[in-house]
Amino acid sequence: MNKEKYIKWYKITKEIVNNDSLVPKRSDQEILKLVSQEDWLMFVLKKFDNTEEAKNAPTPNVFMNLYKNDNKNFCRIGVTFNNVGGVDVLKNILSKYCKDEKEALTKSLLSLDGSWEIVVSRKIKEYNWAQTPEYVEEFHINSNQINDKIVDQIISWVNKIREEGTEKRLSKKVVQETPSVNLLEAIFELNEDEFRKRMKEAFEVLQVCLEVKPNSEIRKIVKSKENELQELEEKHESLMEKWSKRESYLSLGVATQEQINNLEKEIKEIEDKINKLKEELKD
């Protein structure tokens, strides 16, 4: 395997993306370390120390595979969510707490030509954790056909593969079987113009994906809303107690009619907030 072939294309990608966090400047030897024994390169983000750390992080990444076929050079590029944590981040695109990211991602995918595909696969390690995984494709569709129905199909396949993988692992049929999603995948005959176009598109999608909130952040948002709901319900209960005594307050001169009207208005505003929060917290 000629790992040196990746050096040129890494440096072109660095020039195209022009973002050191996404494609850090690296020496030739550092670039070679990013190439796997299976002949593909992962573009490791600057925040990670090495490829292994990046592979295990709940973060999408861009990969490229350079190869020959019938004496022609080809390139396969993808934006992949290749582990359980990464797939969970992709699922969060469906979340009501990631509306902006979902809209931005959908807009990016819809703008692409029909040669890009979304591919959902089973990532299988049958015998031991260290083996090179086998990928079995289960679902694919053009990336620019993305819509809510397609997203539901992707998530349905992801959940199915995970559930079946758990059953197989418990019955010792496999060591590991988990979902892997390439949100973008394309194969093309390698030339610099086409490569530049493809890499620009891939990293634009990756940048949107990196903005998707992780589970930990969503849990914080949910917890904050739950606390807010509890406080509003307690306040509502207190105000309703006052409301039940409004006739007495008026007769005793403790409150004016204007104050009672304001109390009614405040109760209505709080009820609206409570109903809105309950709706937002629905699964």
Image (cartoon, grey):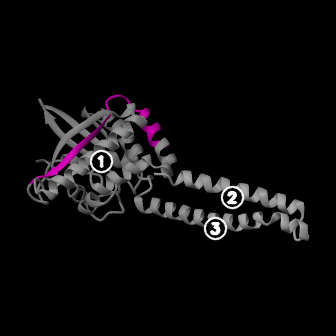
Crowding near the residue tagged with mark 1, few <14, some 14–19, many ≥20 C-alpha atoms within 10 Å: some
Q: What amino acid type should be assigned to the residue bearing mark 2?
A: Ile
Q: Which residue is mark 2?
A: 270
**Number of callouts in the render?**
3
Q: Which residue is mark 3?
A: 234
Q: What amino acid type should be assigned to the residue bearing mark 3?
A: Glu
Residue 122 shown in magenta: yes
Q: Is residue 210 above or below residue 225?
A: above
Disc 1 to disc 3, C-alpha distance: 38 Å
Disc 2 to disc 1, C-alpha distance: 38 Å
Residue 87 shown in magenta: no
Q: Which residue is mark 1?
A: 159
Please give left or right for residue 21 compared with residue 192 in the image. Answer: right
In this orientation, does residue 68 appear? yes
- Dot 1: element: helix
> Between disc 2 and disc 1, whose residue precedes?
1
Crowding near the residue tagged with mark 3, few <14, some 14–19, many ≥20 C-alpha atoms within 10 Å: few
- Residue 50 location, quadrant: bottom left
Percent coordinates x, y for residue 159 in the rendering: 29, 48
Instruction: Find the magenta span and give its range.
Output: 104-126
Disc 3 to disc 2, C-alpha distance: 10 Å
Q: What amino acid type should be assigned to the residue bearing mark 1?
A: Asn
